[in-house]
Image (cartoon, rainbow, N blue to C red):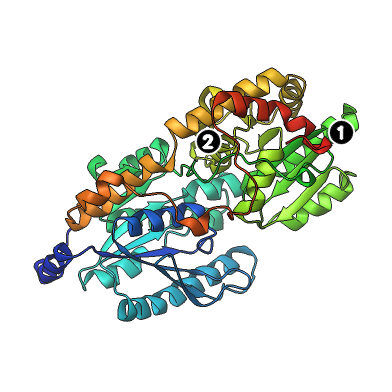
Amino acid sequence: MSKTIGASSASTMEVTRMRHPRVLIIVQNLPVPLDRRVWLECQALTAQGYSVSVICPKGPGDPRFAIIDGVGIYKYRPAPDAKGVAGFVVEFVWSWVRTALLSLRVRRERGFDVIQACNPPDTYWLLARLWRARGVRFVFDQHDLNPELFVSRFGTPQSLGQRIQYRGLLWLERMTYRTADRVISTNASYKKVAETRGGRNPATVTIVRSGPDTTVMRPVYPDPEFRAGAEHLLVYLGIMGPQDNVEVVLDLVQELVHRRGRTGVRAVVMGFGDCLEELKVRSSELALDEYVLFTGRVGLATIAQYLSAADIGIGPDEKSPLNDVSTMNKTMEYMAYALPSVSFDLIETRMSGGDAALYIPSGDLAAFADAVESLLDDEQRRVSLGLAARDRVTTELDWRAQAQAYVGVFDDLTENAPDEERRANWPFRPRPTAQLAEDGPRFVGLDHGELGSFIAARARLGDGVG
C-alpha cells in the first residue's frame, strides 16, 4: 500500500508547495552520468525546476563531488572486490553505509524532500524509512527484478542456502514495495509484478520506459576507421554479466567466420562487466581476436560512431525469468541509430522492437546465424528495417514522452504545481554537455531519402563512402 506522511511533516509539505521540491537519487549499480537512464531522469527534473542531487559509486578518475548541469553528484569509493555471497553482503553493507553518510551531507548542503532509489539492490528502503521521520517521501525506480536475476544466474534454488538467499531477496523487494510512496516500472511486465507480488495499488505504479533521446542518439556520418575495413560489421552494446549471454556474440562470429567462411565479418563489443575478461579469453580460444574488438567502457561519441558504422545490432540475451520481462536498452539504442537488429525472442524485446527487428527462438544459434546472414545479403531489407526502427523509436519510444510521465510522479507525490510555461515548451532534452561536440561528425538527415541511402551505404564505409 502507498504510504502517506504524518501530520508532523505538514509544515514540510507546505514549504514544498511554495517552491520546486528537492530530489535525491540513489544509484549503486553505475556511476552517474554514465547511467544514461538516471541521467535523463536528472535532466528531466532539473528542466522543470527541481533541485536534484545524486549519490552513486565513483567510476575511474571520477571526483568525489561535482555539479554537472545543476545536478549535485556525490560519489563514494566502490566496495572492495569480493566473490560469492560474502562478497555481495560486503558490497551491499559498504554501499549502504557510504550512501547513508553521504545523505547527511546532501541534506545539509542541498537538502531533499524526496528520495528516489534505483535498484539493484533492494536495500535502500531502510534508509528511506529513517528519513521519513523528517518528512521525506520515497520513490522506488525498479530497474531489475532481483529474485528473477538470482534464478537466471543460479537456477531454481535447491540447497538450503540458495533458498534462504532467494527468500531474502523476495523479502527485500517486498519491504521496498511496502515502503515506497510511488513505484516506477520500466515496462508493463515489471508493473504487473509490482501490483501482484508487491501488492501495489495500480494507481501508485507508473511505467517509465528507458527510451533514448532520439535528438541526441541519431545516426552520424562516421569516420571510416570505425568500420575497421570490415565487409560486414556487427555490434553489441551493453553490460557483460553472466545473465547477459554475451558469449553468444562470440559463438555467432565463430559460426559465421570459421564454419560458414564469412571472413569479412567483424564484431565490435562495447561495454563492461563481470564477464569482460572471461570473454576476451574465450575470444582468443576461439581464434577470433582478428574478428572481434572489445572496446571496454566508451562514451556517447564513440557509441555514435560504431552504431552508425555497423550493419546489424546483436541482442544475445537468452530467455530466462529475468531477460524475458526486462527491457533491453540496447535494442532501443540500435533503433535510434536506424540499425536493424537480430535478437532472441523475448516478451519485452519484441515489445520494444515491434516489426523493426528479427526474432529467433532462444538458444538456436544456427537460426541466429541464418537471420544475420539473410540481412547481410539483403541490402533492401536492411534499409527497410532500419527505417522502421528509427520511425518506431522516434514516435513510440522516445524519452520525451517518458519524461512527462516521470516528472508527473514527482509533481503528484509532492503536490507540486507544474510550471505551465515550462510545461508548454516541455524542455526535456538533455543539455549540450550530453551531445556530440560541435566539431564532431555530421548528423545524417532523417528524411527517408537520405537516411535510406545512408543505411544502404554502410557496407561501403570502409571504402570511404560518407
Residue 304 vs residue 252: left or right? left
Distance between mark 1 and mark 2 Cα atoms: 32 Å
Residue 16 vs residue 326: left or right? left
Residue for point 54% across, 61% down: 30
Q: Quadrant of residue 451 in the image? A: top right
127 or 417: which is nearer to us?
A: 417
Q: Mark 1 points at which residue?
A: 264
Which element carries disc 1, helix, strand or loop?
Answer: loop
Residue 408 visible (yes or no): yes
Would you say the residues marked 1 and 2 are in contact, meaning their CB atoms lie under 8 Å apart? no
Residue 168 vs residue 273: left or right? left
Considering the image in quadrants, where does the C terminus appear?
Answer: top right
Which element carries disc 2, helix, strand or loop?
Answer: helix
Residue for point 49% across, 33% down: 393
67 or 202: which is nearer to us?
A: 67
Residue 208 visible (yes or no): no
Q: Nearer the viewer, mark 1 or mark 2?
A: 1
Label 1 environment density (alpha carbons within 10 Å; few <14, some 14–19, many ≥20): few
Point out residue 463 in the picture as x, y percentages from the top left corner: 83, 35
Of callouts 1 and 2, which one flags the residue occurring earlier in the amino acid sequence?
Answer: 1
Q: Mark 2 points at which residue?
A: 324
| Amino acid type indicated by mark 1 | Gly
| Amino acid type indicated by mark 2 | Asp
